[in-house]
Amino acid sequence: MDELNLVVLGRNLQQLRLAKGISLSQLASDAGIAKSNLSRLENGSGNPTLDTIWRLAMQLDTSFGSLVDSVNTPIEDNGMQVQLIERGTDDPQVDAYWMSCAPHTNKISKAHSLGTVETISVISGEIETGEENNIKHLAAGDFHRFPADKSHVYRTTTAGATLLVTIIYANKESAHERK
C-alpha cells in the first residue's frame, strides 16, 4: 500500500479507536499485535496484512470496509489483492469488494464477526472457496455463499481468479440481542 493510502487507513483506524474510547495499548492487546505496530499503522506507516486489518475491525466492532474506506488502491497480501468497491450504509451492512488471487494462492481466513456471510462470485479464473469443511470449486460465472463467521478458504491452482466478494454483516438489531 502506498504512503497516501496508509495515511488514510491510519486515520480511519485512529478515529474509530478514539470514538470507541479504546486505548492504543488495549486495542493492540485485544487484536494480538504489538503496540508499536499499531502506533505505526495509525501514523500512516507499516505494512498491514489483510488478517491484521480484519482483527482490528473485529476488535473495534466495525466492518472491514470502515477501515479501508477511501483507500483507493488494492490492499496486497501474499498473492491476494482486495479493494473496496462500495460500503453499504443500511442494516444489515453490505460491502462489496474486488479481489484478485494469484496462481497458487492458499489463504485460510480467520472467522469474521458473528453472523457475517460472504458471497464469492467468480469473474474469471477458478478458485476453491468456502468454509474449511464445505469447500466449493468455482469457475467464471459461479458463486458460493457461506458463513464467514467460521474459518474459510481461498485456494487457486495454476490459474488465478478475479472475484466479486460481497460481505453481509449481521443485522445490528440481531447482534445486540445475541450479546
Image (cartoon, rainbow, N blue to C red):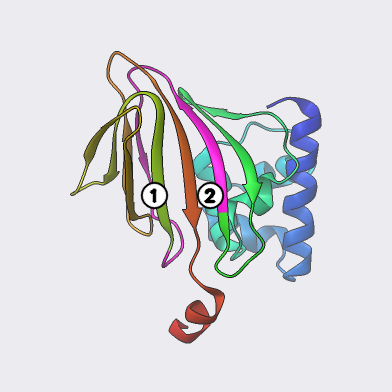
Residue at (47% x, 86% y) in the render: 177
**Quadrant position of residue 90:** bottom right
**Quadrant position of residue 153:** top left
Q: Residue furthest top?
A: 158
Labelled pair 2, 1 in contact (Cβ < 8 Å): yes
Q: Indicate whether residue 128 is drawn in magenta.
A: no
Q: Helix, strand or loop at disc 1?
A: loop
Residue corresponding to mark 1: 110
Residue 177 versus residue 125: which sits nearer the camera?
125
Q: Is residue 168 above or below residue 82?
A: below
Q: Residue furthest bottom?
A: 177
| Residue 64 percent across, percent down from the top left | 59, 51
**Are there few (<14), some (14-19), or many (20+) residues within 10 Å of tag 2?**
many
**Quadrant position of residue 139:** top left
Q: Residue 57 vs residue 164: left or right?
A: right
Which quadrant: the N terminus? top right
| Residue 98 percent across, percent down from the top left | 54, 34
Residue 128 versus residue 10: which sits nearer the camera?
128
Q: Earlier in the sequence, mark 2 or mark 1?
A: 2
Residue corresponding to mark 2: 54
Q: Helix, strand or loop at disc 2?
A: helix
Q: CA distance from mark 2 to mark 1?
A: 9 Å
The magenta stretch is: 95-115
Residue at (65% x, 42% y) in the render: 37
Name the residue type under label 2: Trp
Q: Which labelled disc corresponds to residue 43?
A: none
Q: Is residue 14 above or below residue 90?
A: above
Q: Is residue 176 above or below residue 105?
A: below
